[in-house]
Amino acid sequence: MVAKTTAKDDVIKKDKGNKKSKEAAPPAEEANGDHAPGHNSGEITTETMHFFMNALERAEKKVDVAKKELKGVRAKMEVQGINLEVFDETLKQIEQDDATTYRRYALRKHYALLLGLPIGSQLDLLDPDEAMRNATDDDLIDRARSDGYRAGLKGLTPKDHCPHALETGAGGAWMKGWENGQAAIAAEMEQQKKREEEEAAGEEED
């Protein structure tokens, strides 16, 4: 005996079938193998990857240009007689505080003694604490002037780098040194510019 179905039963079966089909079918984007996540989904899109890949390539090209420029500068330093190895070591020392520099020199002195190398006693003059205890007013003024001169050479501003009150003797000496440093580096830049122009003119003649 076959059970009879009503029109209502047919509608219910049809609705259930459509619901199962919707649950089983993947979204159109996933079916095609692509993702289109929302802005805040946390997923990475192909477009995002390419954006940063392009940005990295541009940055790497800038680094390459900077490396070539750096290599050129160092080559010019060697031509003018600067020992790059000693220069690099000295540059590291400049970035250190006096106490660190003294400790490193003291360690080198100790190693030199262990290896039987002849050394002088000038290392003792580098002790910053000893130097400050024995410093006279003239010594402090000279040190301030020397510090100011180096600051001028490096293009540092008095407002941000002068450690002395400008109305004091040390402050005045620092400023005088800074002005001399600025004038000296400007003259050096002009001299280097002239040298490069002469070299360029010589290459054109050749």
Image: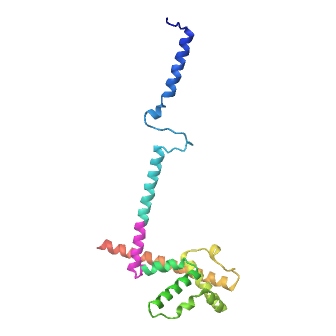
Question: Which residue sits at x=48%, y=76%?
Answer: 189
- The coloring applied to the image is rainbow
Whether residue 189 can be seen here:
yes
Q: Nearer the viewer, residue 118 or 183?
A: 118
Magenta: main secondary structure: helix
Give percent across and percent down for residue 139. Answer: 63, 90
**Is 74 part of what is drawn in magenta?**
yes
The quarter of the picture where residue 128 lies is: bottom right
Vertically, is 146 above or below 203? below
Whether residue 182 can be seen here:
no
Image quadrant containing the C terminus: bottom left
**Is 85 part of what is drawn in magenta?**
no
From the viewer's perspective, is 141 left or right of 122? right
From the viewer's perspective, is 66 left or right of 124? left
Q: Nearer the viewer, residue 101 or 204?
A: 101
The quarter of the picture where residue 142 lies is: bottom right
Q: Magenta residues, as a range? A: 67-84
Question: Which residue sits at x=64%, y=92%?
Answer: 134
Give percent across and percent down for residue 193. Answer: 44, 75
Question: Which residue sits at x=48%, y=46%?
Answer: 48
Vertically, is 176 above or below 23? below
From the viewer's perspective, is 139 left or right of 94? right
